[in-house]
Image (cartoon, rainbow, N blue to C red):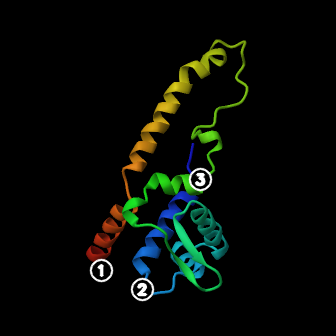
Amino acid sequence: MQISSRFTVAVHVLLCMELLKGEHKITSDLLASSVAVNPVVIRRLLQQLKAAGIVRVARGTGGAELMKPAESITLLDIYHAVECVEEGELFHFHENPNPLCPVGRNIHGVLDGRLAQIQRAMEREMESITLQKLLEDTREKICCNS
């Protein structure tokens, strides 16, 4: 199991948007240069974040900005905006375990509830971390490493 890089790229982009606003026009080219990806990747991510109500994107070179305060955006909000988790399930279960095998016949009964519990715990933790907290941590790192 691995969460795609879309999630961490989205967090990176949102942090850049807030930390660089006022100094730079927040464009997909600027964000792409920070993340070191093609601007097309950033534009797709911004569209997902826009659809989730997290960012506002002006056409052309208008730039992007947060639609709501950083303290009201959680890692879970960002995760839900950009990750394509089918049917809300983080863990993908192999499709056809062998019903003739004692393990194959019982694997869903053994794992399904536990995997759901793990996912709920991860989501609770992600919900407790705001973009504001990450901004504060980033500012602190910038000050200490300058």
Q: Is residue 136 left or right of residue 7?
A: left
- In the displayed structure, 109 sits above or below 68; it is above
Labels 3 and 1: the sequence-earlier one: 3
Residue 28: x, y in percent? 59, 78
Q: Is residue 59 left or right of residue 122?
A: right
- In the displayed structure, 97 sits above or below 146; it is above
Residue 15: x, y in percent? 43, 70
Residue at the spot x=49%, y=69% of the render? 67
The quadrant of the rendering that contains the N terminus is top right
Residue tagged 1: 146
- The label on residue 22 is 2
Q: Nearer the viewer, mark 3 or mark 1?
A: 3
Residue 132: x, y in percent? 35, 64
**Quarter of the rendering containing residue 106:** top right
**Quarter of the rendering containing residue 109:** top right
Q: Is residue 144 left or right of residue 91?
A: left
Residue tagged 3: 83
What type is the residue that disc 3 sits on? Glu
Residue 3: x, y in percent? 56, 50
